[in-house]
Amino acid sequence: MAEKTKIDPGVLKIAIALIVGAMAVIFDTTIVSVALHTLATELHTSVDTIQWVSTAYLLALGVTIPLVGWAQQRFGGKRLWLAALTIFLIGSVLCSLAWDAPSLIAFRAVQGVGGGLMLPLLSTLVMQAAGGKSLGSLMSVVSLPTALGPILGPVIGGLILSAFDWRWLFWVNVPFCVAGFILALRMLPADEPGARPKLDIVGLVLLSPAMVGILYGLSNVNRDGGFGRFDVLFPALAGVALLVAFIVYAVRRGPRALVDVRLFSHRPVASASALLFLTGASLYGAMLLLPLYFQEVRGTDALGAGLLLAPQGIGTLLSRSIAGRLTDRFGARWVSVIGFAIVGVATIPFAFVSPSTNEWMLMAALVVRGFGLGAVMIPLMTVAFVGLERPDVPHASILTRIAQQVGGSFGVALLAVILQGAALGAHGLEGIADAFDQAFWWAIGFTALAVVLSLLLPGRPKAVAVEPEPAGAASR
């Protein structure tokens, strides 16, 4: 068993090279999220306008993610990764040089194109290199930035804004991009492009606008009117209609579709996607509520709220290696069940918060909650790839990434509406705290549903069919 769970050193080198570059993308999103009010002031524009700094990035992700499988076949994984990292680097430098809000919004879209290519490609390249061996232990290393980004990002952003100019929010990406490019150039195995497949234009015309419509609609929910707004209902419903049309089209087209949705007939892919949707809702939804509670009820500033969330990151670090080993040994099912149960139980104290709730007790709960989140992410990001043939891995990576992205947007939107509705007519800090209590109960509900769905995950791992990189492949 010790040999089965040991990560191959060559695969670990590939993973580290990819992680360094990916850290720029993962931390950038949460760093920028705490700076919107500052950016609105510095660029002399409204908060509604500056919200497009986040929205443009999100929509560029939605357009780009579906293209990754085709682009990897067409250009090769190493070339695509280096190109995506370069695009993100250029976008970051341009953002730091922005002269007004429209230019910053446009440059954030450039960043989003690079990030949309990198996020699913990261999982694909690592899983293909691993050849189905020690996936849990490997993913405990690979997904570390993904878990820490929402936790450490606000702290880093707050520190930068308190000590430097806002432009450093984007310059901080440059060292990660440069180091990641050099490491990838040296450590990633060269892979020649495949059969140069034709781009599925019909699939692209259906799926990318579907993602844009859904994500754009959900991004507007936090404004007055919530889900009843025209700019929520129309784009979201149009996006859902296009998504249904794509699924029908892709099932008929089979493996030639832009994304092979027939993989949902593979139980690990379907169950992992559903749970990643709920994980996105639980993780990112709660990450909306937690800093807002500390700021609006406890009166802390953005940096103070970020620091108060740091214990959750500590908990995440404590569970990752344990969860990876247990996933490799016992399978994803019970690791996920126990992890989600821990998250749910540790969130309950926040459903009873008041302006005077002991902060040390809340920070202790955050350590436990982080422990559960770290345990959950490993089996979910691993199990979808178990038993897949090598050509199916990019499609599974795209499907799970879309599920997590849409789930996160849905969770943030729903909890924002619940919080706003509960806060209407609230009197004083006690009334606002009661509104947070209701929203946290919904977050706990997401987690409880995830516990039940986790029972659908596979149990003990079986032999996998993913093939490793061809022998003799060398870096060029």
Image (cartoon, rainbow, N blue to C red):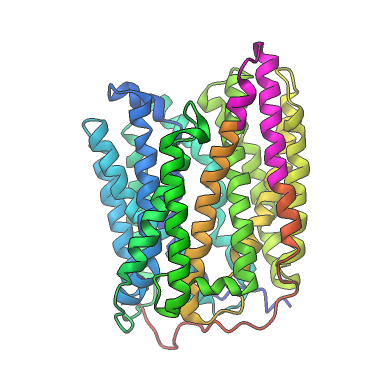
Q: In this figure, what is the number of numbered marks?
A: 0
Q: Quadrant of residue 107?
A: top left
Pinpoint residue 50: horizontal percent, then vertical percent. Answer: 34, 30
In the rendered image, is residue 320 in sight? Answer: yes
- Magenta-drawn stretch contains 440: yes
Q: Is residue 297 left or right of residue 188?
A: right
Q: Is residue 405 above or below residue 159?
A: below
Q: Quadrant of the N terminus?
A: bottom right
Q: Is residue 281 above or below residue 423?
A: below
Pinpoint residue 117: horizontal percent, then vertical percent. Answer: 37, 60
Residue ID at (29%, 38%) = 105
- Magenta-drawn stretch contains 408: no
Pinpoint residue 376: horizontal percent, then vertical percent. Answer: 67, 56
Q: Nearer the viewer, residue 226 or 432?
A: 226
Pinpoint residue 52: horizontal percent, then vertical percent. Answer: 35, 36
Magenta segment, which residues? 418-446
Residue ID at (61%, 71%) = 135
Q: Nearer the viewer, residue 116 or 224?
A: 224
Residue ID at (38%, 25%) = 47
Magenta-colored segment: predominant secondary structure: helix
In the rendered image, is residue 10 in sight? Answer: no
Residue ID at (57%, 70%) = 264
Judged from this view, the residue extending furthest toward the bottom is 471
Q: Nearer the viewer, residue 232 or 174?
A: 232
Q: Quadrant of the C terminus?
A: bottom left
